[in-house]
Image (tube, rainbow, N blue to C red):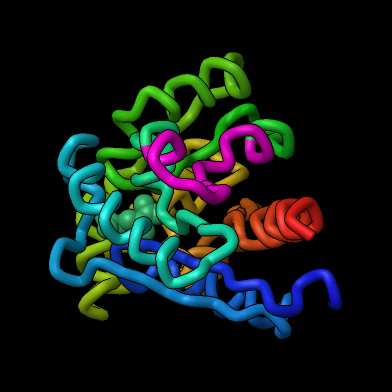
Amino acid sequence: MEVCQMITVGVFDSGVGGKSVVNAIEAALPDIKIVYAEDKENVPYGTKNPDELYRLVLPILNMLSKQGCDVIIIACNTVTTTIIERLRLELPLPLIGIEPMVKPAAEMSKTGIIAMCATPTTLQSARYAWLKENYAKNIQVLEPDCSDWASLIETDQLDHEIIKSRIEEVCKKGADAIVLGCTHYHWIEHDIQMIADEYGAIVIQPEKPIIEQLKKVLSQLS
Ligand code: DGL
């Protein structure tokens, strides 16, 4: 792990979603220092427009940069899919973005139907439209209504019955790959997978690939 020593990684999300990503990074790369930043005052981000997000996020990332981070992980699909390119223009360090795993889900689907659980802003973003156009052209992408899930998870109020009804709905329509396209939903991955198991569907989320990406970026820094 010598490549990671003395390295500081900033991780950012609107709220608790990014903490699940932090846990995964800490488990995989115990020698790096992680500085976590969130925006509790303004969570949820998933109903905000790109300009509002930019105004909120840029100062926080500047602060992480000033705190000595070598790289920042945007552990927020909503921010990545809407404003990461604008942020990259302003920040002097690499930004790694977490975005909806359309491509892997499309590749692993046997039914040709996948489900994307994500925030309204992510689902409306041009980047998400591009991912579907380029990687899921002949795939049906179902988008269950998860619009209030991030807020409910933030306050620990998401009811199992709500999760069950949304996940069963897409499984019954034939989705065999379910993407967690919002890091807040990582906290209910186990619950979602238990429901999906009854239909033989797989649940995917980006922690492992993002750690691989982080290792790659860190090896280029040293
Ligand atoms: N966790 C974030 C995401 O991955 C944002 C959730 C929210 O604040 O609405 O999209």
The one of 137 and 48 positioned closer to us in this rendering: 48
Q: Residue at x 26, y 56 (%)?
A: 59
Q: Residue at x 24, y 66 (%)?
A: 39
- Asked if the stretch drawn in magenta spans residue 101, the answer is yes
The one of 74 and 198 positioned closer to us in this rendering: 74
Q: Position of residue 194 (x, y in %)?
A: 55, 69
The one of 58 and 39 positioned closer to us in this rendering: 58
Indicate left or right for 169 with 51 as reference.
Answer: right
- Asked if the stretch drawn in magenta spans residue 97, the answer is yes
Quadrant the C terminus occupies: bottom right
Q: Position of residue 216 (x, y in %)?
A: 77, 53
Count every numbered label the image shows and give the total. 0
Whether residue 101 appears in this view of the structure is yes
Q: Residue at x 37, y 62 (%)?
A: 13
Q: Position of residue 53 (x, y in %)?
A: 23, 45
Q: Is residue 188 above or below residue 47?
A: below
Q: Residue at x 41, y 54 (%)?
A: 76
Q: Of all residues shown, which one is farthest toward the right?
A: 2
Quadrant the N terminus occupies: bottom right
Indicate left or right for 217 with 132 as reference.
Answer: right
Quadrant holding ligand 1? bottom left
Q: What stretch of residues is rendered in magenta?
A: 87-105
Q: Position of residue 196 (x, y in %)?
A: 55, 58
Whether residue 165 appears in this view of the structure is no
Q: Is residue 146 above or below residue 173?
A: below
The one of 49 and 168 positioned closer to us in this rendering: 49
Residue 122 position by quadrant = top left
Indicate left or right for 144 with 217 as reference.
Answer: left
Q: Is residue 214 above or below residue 3?
A: above
